[in-house]
Each structure stands twice: as structure tokens, then as C-alpha cells.
Amino acid sequence: MTDPQTLFSDDYAAAADAADPLQRFRAQFHLPRFGEVEQAYFVGNSLGLQPRGARAQVEDVLDKWAMEAVEGHFRGNSQWMTYHRLLSAQLAEIVGAQPEEVVAMNSLTANLHFLMVGFYRPTAERPAILMEAGAFPSDRYALESQVRFHGFDPDTDLIEVQPGADGLFGIDAVAAAIEEHGHRLALVLWPGVQYRTGEAFDLAEITRLGHAAGAVVGFDLAHAAGNLPLQLHDSDADFAVWCHYKYLNSGPGAVAGAFVHARHAITDRPRFAGWWGHDAATRFRMGPDFQPTPGAEGWQLSNPPILGLAPLRASLDLFTEAGMPALRSKSEALTGYLETLIRSQLDDVLDIVTPRDVARRGAQLSLRVRGGREQGRALFECLSDNGVLGDWREPDVIRISPAPLYNTHADVLRFVRTVARWRDA
Ligand SMILES: *Cc1c(COP(=O)(O)O)cnc(C)c1O
């Protein structure tokens, strides 16, 4: 193990970056400027940076529209009729699914609702949804409104598992809650990575526990997709949803993702149907009766916003080229470097909320400012004033998420130095 003072040096960071097999990818992104230099951008968990290839993909669509108009639907490899399929194989690879199990459509909260139409089927005996307390508000709103929509009472039927005093759940708390409430659960809806703490979960184990209790199991992978290698098919999850604007770098409000397990490819579960979910072979007979396309595509409603899908192609190409295993190794190294430097240099300033166990976290570290909210705000502003971008979560947490496609050891060192200078000032 290299000693902490050696790690806390430009030489070490430069050598680690020079040895990084993924170093070439940073140049594939637009890095926001901070005066003469680039920002140290650690907010890829909120809005990933723009891949340089995104503009060309969007321009291709604009050109095709200009030159071919309606015929753009039917002409060439990137015809709009099947454009979403250009993404499926790469997307499937990233989340560990079969191509028929995934689709890029709608937005995240919309997908959560639409999939719950089929996968949340409460009955008087089994009305409840199990979720984590302190979830991302949109998820809570969605789940609570679904419970109400079906005529049930969120006070009793939206069960929120409380984390421990450290803010973390651990699989044992999830198991205990499923054990306690299992007989009443229609659905377990759990995050892949909790947005506030960065705690990652074993999807296969949660699915096993939920299924054993007789519940459907779905995941919100907003903070997991493109961050952790996932094996969604093998996890046996019934469904999952995620967005593409965080780790997947596809732009603000990018078209989102959805997974429906192959065993539900053909299903008589109810769904809210639209023509783009109709069997592609007969869609244009324009018949009155809905025949769903097997698999995730059958859950589509509208013909997709092609301009919105275009940046995804640029981003997915980078993920395909780098590969999730290599991205994960670099991510472990970068986040591990951040963790080691915080523990050795900044232990009096920052308390790491995120689990220490690498298997229980992704790229993000959530850092509680020991001095409390006022101090935290001052530190956060000092970081921004120095071109070091993290994000703030009330009351006293700064989230720092090194993204392995574009962050470097030098970025991490710059964060640690900026905090140390603020403390010593
Ligand atoms: C980012 C995020 C959202 C945002 O929802 P949109 O529908 O994309 O606006 C919802 N849930 C979680 C867990 C998130 O991390």
C-alpha cells in the first residue's frame, strides 16, 4: 500500500492518469471551462457531460429531416421507423439484458408509472408497495399516487423501510422488511444505488427475497445504469427503469430506459397501450385491435423523439468501446483514491456516508460536512468558486461522483487540495 503522503501528490496523480487504459475517453467530452483550465466536474451523477459525438448525431437527424422529410422514416440504416432499435443492443449490454428486454422511451418517472400499470396489481389482501424511506421525491410521488389511484391508503400501503442511524440500509434491513410485510406486498420497488448516500444494492438478492414473499420486484436504476455493471436478466427482476442523462451522458431530460424481463415478453398484464407498442409487423395496417410487440418494445406508446434519441447513440458508442468491466475497474480506482485521500487528509472535515465496502457502492461518495450546514455551504461555495463541481444535498452533504469516462486522479487531487486549503485558511 502506497503511503498517504505519496498519494497526496501531483506526481502520483499524474502517474496514475498516465497508466489509465481509459485516458483517451476524456477528450471525447466537452469539459466545462473554469477560466484558463477545465472544471473538475464531479456531477456526472446529476448531468453527465456532453460527448463530442452528440452534435453530429443530432445534426444527422436534422439533415435527414431537411432532405428526406417523411421518407426519413423508411430510408437508410438510421431510418426513424426502427431508430430505437439501433440503441437496444448496446443498451442491453450496459445493463446486462437481452436486446428484446430493453427499450429507450419516454422519461424515467413516466416509465415508472407505465410499467406499474402492469406490474403493480394490488388486491385487498396484497395492496402494498415496499420502498426505501428518503427516496428521490419523484419516485415517492409516483408510488404514492399509484397506491391512491388503485383506491388504497398510502399510510398503510406504502411501506417505507427506514435506514439505520448511519443512513444506510444494508441487505439485512431490506430482508427484515420483506419478511415482516411480505404477505401484504404487491410490489418491491428499490433503487440500484440510493441517490443520497450512494449505497448500492444486490439486485439479485432483493429480487430473490421479494419473489419468495410473493411480490413483483422492480428497480429504479437512475444512479446505477452506466455506473455499475448490472446483470438485469440474471437478477430475475421483473422490470426496471432508469434515465440516460446521469452516468449515461445523453443530455438534459434525455429519453429514458426500461427493462421488462424476458419471461414477461408475452403477457396478459394490463398496460396503457399506444401504437408504437403494437406489433411492428402489422402496425401500419392501422387496425383497431392492439397486438403488443413481444418484449420491452411492446410498452412503447408514441413514435419516439428521434432528436432526443440521437445523443444516446454517441454516448452508447463510448460505453461500448470502453466496456463496463474496464469502466468499473477505473471507477473503483478513482473513487478509492478519493476515499483514501479524504480519510488521510480531510478526516477532520468530511465524514464519508457511503459504504466503505466497494461492493456496496458505485462512483459516488456522499460526504457529510462535520462542521454542519453553515460550514458545509461555505465549503460548497468555495469548491464552486474554484471550479470544483459537486452537488449539495440538504442539510449537510456534498456528493462527489468521479465518472470513469472523463474524470482523472488529477481531478480528485484538486478536490482534496481545495478542501484542505479552505480548512487551513
Ligand atoms: C434523477 C432521478 C429521477 C428524475 O426523474 P425524471 O423523471 O427523469 O425527471 C427520479 N428518480 C430517481 C431515483 C432519480 O435519481
Image (cartoon, grey):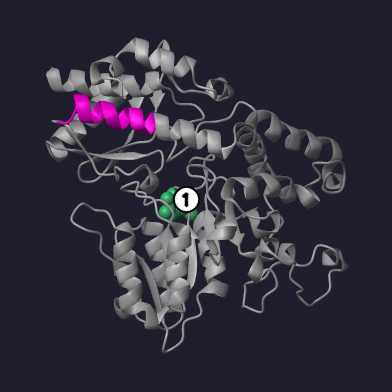
Above/below status of 278 relative to 179: above
Ligand 1 within 8 Å, label 1 CB:
yes
Q: State which quarter of the image contains the C terminus.
A: top left
Q: How many marks?
A: 1
Judge from the rendering whether residue 206 lies leftward or rightward of residue 161; answer left or right. Answer: right
Tell me if residue 338 is in the magenta stretch: yes
Q: What span is colored magenta in the figure?
A: 334-347
Q: Residue 69's spot in the image, x, y percent?
A: 83, 43
Percent x, y for residue 391?
33, 37
Is residue 332 shown in magenta?
no
Question: Compared with residue 176, is residue 339 higher up or lower down, i.e. above or below?
Answer: above
Q: State whether residue 408 is above or below residue 317.
A: above
Q: Is residue 352 visible?
A: yes
Q: Amino acid at mark 1?
A: Ala
Question: Is 295 on the left or on the right of 368, as rendered?
Answer: right
Q: Is residue 159 visible?
A: no
- Tag 1, which secondary structure? loop
Seen as rendered, the residue at the extreme front is 1
Q: Residue at x 68, y 35 (%)?
A: 58
Q: For this rendering, which residue is in front, 386 or 364?
A: 364
Q: Is residue 177 left or right of residue 346?
A: right
Q: Quadrant of the N terminus?
A: top left
Front one among 236 and 365: 236
Q: What's the magenta bit mostly, secondary-structure-wise? A: helix
Q: Residue furthest bottom?
A: 124
According to the picture, the residue beneath numbered tag 1 turns out to be 222
Residue 278, image x, y percentages: 76, 67
Task: Tell me the crowding category of disc 1: few under 14, some 14 to 19, or many 20 or more residues within 10 angstroms, Cα based.
Answer: many
- In the rendering, at what x and y percent does residue 299 appear? 65, 65
> Residue drawn at (34%, 58%), measured in percent from left and top?
135
Q: Residue at x 81, y 62 (%)?
A: 280
Judge left or right: residue 69 versus residue 242.
right
